[in-house]
Amino acid sequence: MITFAARHAQGDFVLDLAFMSEARLVALFGPSGSGKTTVLHIIAGLIRPREGKVVVAGEVLTDTAAGIFLPPHKRRLGYVFQDGRLFPHLTVRQNLLYGRWLAPRRVRFNSLGEIVDLLGLAPLLDRRPATLSGGEKQRVAIGRALLASPRALLMDEPLASLDEARKAETLPYIERLRDHSALPIVYVSHSAAEISRLTREVVRLEAGRAAPSPPRDTGRN
Amino acid sequence: MALSPEEWVAVRLSLKVASVAALVSLPAAIGVAYALARGRFPGRAVLDGIVHLPLVLPPVVTGYLLLLTFGRRGPVGTALESCCGLVFSFRWTGAALAAGVMAFPLMVRAIRLSIEAVDRRLEEAAATLGANRVLVFATITLPLALPGVMAGLVLAFAKALGEFGATITFVSAIPGETQTLPAAIYAYTQAPGGDAGALRLSLVAIAIALVAVVASELLTRRALGAGRLS
């Protein structure tokens, strides 16, 4: 469902990576600074790679050889940022509806009620982001991305800023998403425990390149 | 401390000139501030310089340049008069133009700072949710920068209220038409026995300016807090 290839330099850092996945949830795993977020930014169109090709759910989003580059607002990719990035001047409800309001009617596949139920957001709707806990913020951020009716979800360390209790509380929501929606998910994390719980489809990154898989992953197709 | 009818005329005219100057130049100031804060284009430094010019030029020079371009025989003045019946020379509209030009750098500066304080990562997030650049600006950048925009507006109003040099050079000081508060004060100081009048009007000017500066300061502080990620 996702094909990615890119070569891109940013200062001293060089990203040179290609992968393909048909899995529901593919994880990008690697230490900080290995280029995981850069990969997501390239998929989302927030970075235009020097050379590269990005295809998500059959749609060519970037193809530098063919001169194709869709701007971020036309990609319909739900990006869940590490820091939530909720809009501070809007209520939770307005944050959730922001992307839905912008999505054309014919592509909408969910409703506010469904997402509020799925993520347990009902008690938060009239609050401001500043009054939410870290875990609540991330759930709102996930809901906001989903309500834009995206082609795929990009999740950048959605649990990294949470303590263990909040992590344990938020992870089941992500598992629910993986199992009950048809959305492909690209999941970035540096936590091996988190990833082993979520998927067996892992792209390992090291200093901008694919790292060789450890033995337990070999022999699998 | 009662003001004479003529003094009230000058105060009211000043308030009208300063309000029109600040409000009419606001959209342009927002546009220029956004371009300077977020734009990357050739000539950005030149634009920055031109915008700040009225701040460093002698006001008489600005007034004279306005006279040359917007006066009855100036190229822009002639064109505006024949197309829209808009006349600047020796009218209160000219006083508003002069005040607007002089206040423009201050307004742009306040708005630019508040736009720069808006977290660009929020703008990126809005883009991934489907908002194009215009919508990102209208729904994220501008609302978060709004206190700074208000601060710029108030500051420009205060500056316009005190404008003297460019105004008197461009449109002179005709009582009831172009004689604003500072011009009326100046007239008092040049006339025998005008001390009391000059003092009265000066106190009015001080009061208005003080209120404006304090309001602007409060709004700026709010602006710098609002754009941060919670």
Image (cartoon, coloured by chain):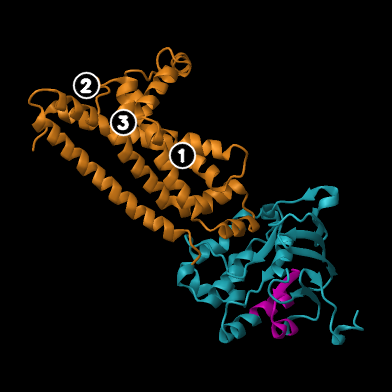
Q: What residue type is labelled 3?
A: Val
B86 vs A197, left or right, is left
**Corner quadrant of residue B7:** top left
Q: Quadrant of the N terminus of chain A?
A: bottom right
Q: Quadrant of the C terminus of chain A?
A: bottom right
Binning the other alpha carbons within 10 Å of mark 2 as few (below 14), some (14 to 19) or many (20 upward) gives some
- The residue wearing badge 2 is B175
- The residue wearing badge 1 is B29
In percent of width and height, residue B107 lies at: 41, 42
Residue B8: in magenta span: no
Q: What residue type is labelled 2?
A: Pro
- The residue wearing badge 3 is B17
Q: Is residue B110 above or below residue A12?
A: above
Disc 1: which chain?
B
In percent of width and height, residue A132 lies at: 48, 73
Q: Residue at x 63, y 49 (%)?
A: B132
Q: Is residue A124 above or below residue B142?
A: below
